[in-house]
Image (spheres, rainbow, N blue to C red):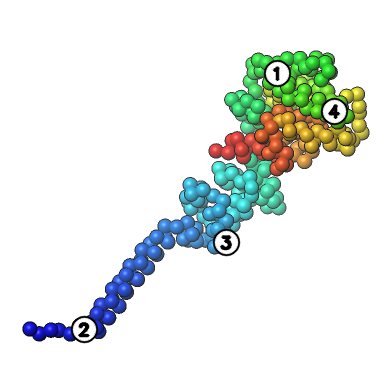
């Protein structure tokens, strides 16, 4: 019997070939898998590594898949980085940017999200009243003529001027806020509250006859588009006081610092007129609940911005 010696050379060659095959197979598999990644797909469109990371960190897989159907556009990265970016509005952001090149990404996102870029008369929509205290009523979104809260009551005399009405659902919050202010030396009363569709129509028509339609639309909400009709929007003022510049008053400062704790927001502020479509109303408050009010207070956004991003995003 002949015993063959172990051929180390052949074994070595075999191992080298086997490792080569394994290495080559892994490379093929790795390359194949890499082609399935967003890094590869986005780079194929034209996005560099930094841009790709921004897109991956801020978009869902579904949104990335939609983005892959579009051509490379560096402006997209700029918009995606914005906190209130909403993917469904991407094309509108880009269109607006093309005609407003000097506007910042932040401003464009706010304008498009709140539909402030649209002519409100031609784009009126019905308010979704199922949202309750978070329903949106503004120049675009309006209530039907027959909409009336079923819990409208007259505010007690110690908290309002004669005849002011409000939704009973927020009366306790109003009282709690006014009582808290009273303890700190500030006396507030409601000077205006619920208005029916007809009352708002009469006010609008009177203003229109006196000053013309354009002036009326600048100053007064059209019937159905006044938040007063919701019963959860009102005007609150310091009792028996008048100010040349009310924003410098201690009363206004107190409301600024405390209204959100009771679920109220300043509805029409001077810095958001472009988004709300209405001029500034210093003492105008609106109930949205403590959670939403706190978010708007902390993030310094108006209700239109909040509604677009937190309620109507999808």
Residue 121 pos. (x, y %): 67, 30
Q: Which residue is mark 1?
A: 168
Q: Mark 1 and 2 residues: CB-CB less than 8 Å, in contact? A: no
Of the pair 308 and 266, the residue shown nearer to us:
266
Of the pair 16 and 237, the residue shown nearer to us:
16
Between label 3 and label 4, give the one nearer the viewer: 4
Q: CA distance from mark 1 to mark 2?
A: 97 Å
Q: CA distance from mark 2 to mark 4?
A: 99 Å
At 61% from the left edge and 38% from the top edge, which residue is drawn? 310
Q: CA distance from mark 1 to mark 4?
A: 23 Å
Q: Quadrant of the C terminus?
A: top right
Q: CA distance from mark 3 to mark 4?
A: 55 Å
Left or right of residue 7, residue 211 in this image = right
Between label 1 and label 3, give the one nearer the viewer: 1
Corner quadrant of residue 221: top right
At mark 3, the secondary structure is helix
């Amino acid at each position: 019997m002949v015993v063959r010696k172990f051929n180390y050379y052949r074994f070595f060659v075999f191992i080298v070939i086997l490792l080569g095959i394994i290495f080559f197979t892994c490379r093929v598999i790795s390359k194949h898998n890499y082609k399935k990644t967003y890094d590869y797909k986005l780079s194929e469109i034209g996005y560099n590594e930094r841009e790709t990371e921004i897109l991956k960190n801020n978009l869902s897989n579904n949104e990335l898949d939609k983005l892959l159907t579009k051509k490379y556009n560096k402006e997209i990265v700029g918009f995606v980085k914005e906190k209130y970016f909403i993917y469904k509005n991407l094309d509108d952001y880009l269109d607006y940017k093309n005609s407003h090149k000097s506007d910042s990404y932040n401003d464009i996102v706010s304008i498009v999200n709140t539909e402030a870029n649209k002519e409100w008369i031609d784009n009126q929509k019905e308010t979704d009243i199922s949202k309750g205290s978070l329903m949106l009523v503004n120049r675009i979104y309006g209530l039907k003529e027959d909409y009336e809260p079923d819990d409208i009551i007259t505010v007690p005399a110690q908290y309002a001027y004669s005849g002011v009405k409000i939704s009973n659902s927020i009366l306790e919050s109003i009282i709690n806020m006014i009582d808290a202010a009273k303890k700190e030396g500030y006396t507030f009363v409601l000077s205006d509250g619920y208005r029916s569709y007809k009352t708002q129509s009469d006010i609008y028509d009177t203003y229109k006859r006196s000053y013309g339609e354009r002036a009326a639309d600048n100053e007064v909400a059209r019937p159905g588009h006044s938040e007063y009709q919701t019963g959860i929007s009102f005007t609150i003022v310091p009792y028996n006081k008048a100010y040349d510049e009310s924003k410098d008053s201690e009363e206004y400062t107190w409301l600024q610092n405390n209204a959100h704790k009771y679920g109220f927001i300043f509805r029409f502020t001077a810095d958001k007129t472009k988004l709300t479509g209405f001029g500034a109303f210093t003492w105008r408050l609106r109930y949205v609940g403590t959670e939403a009010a706190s978010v708007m207070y902390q993030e310094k956004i108006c209700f239109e911005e909040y509604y677009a991003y937190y309620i109507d995003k999808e």
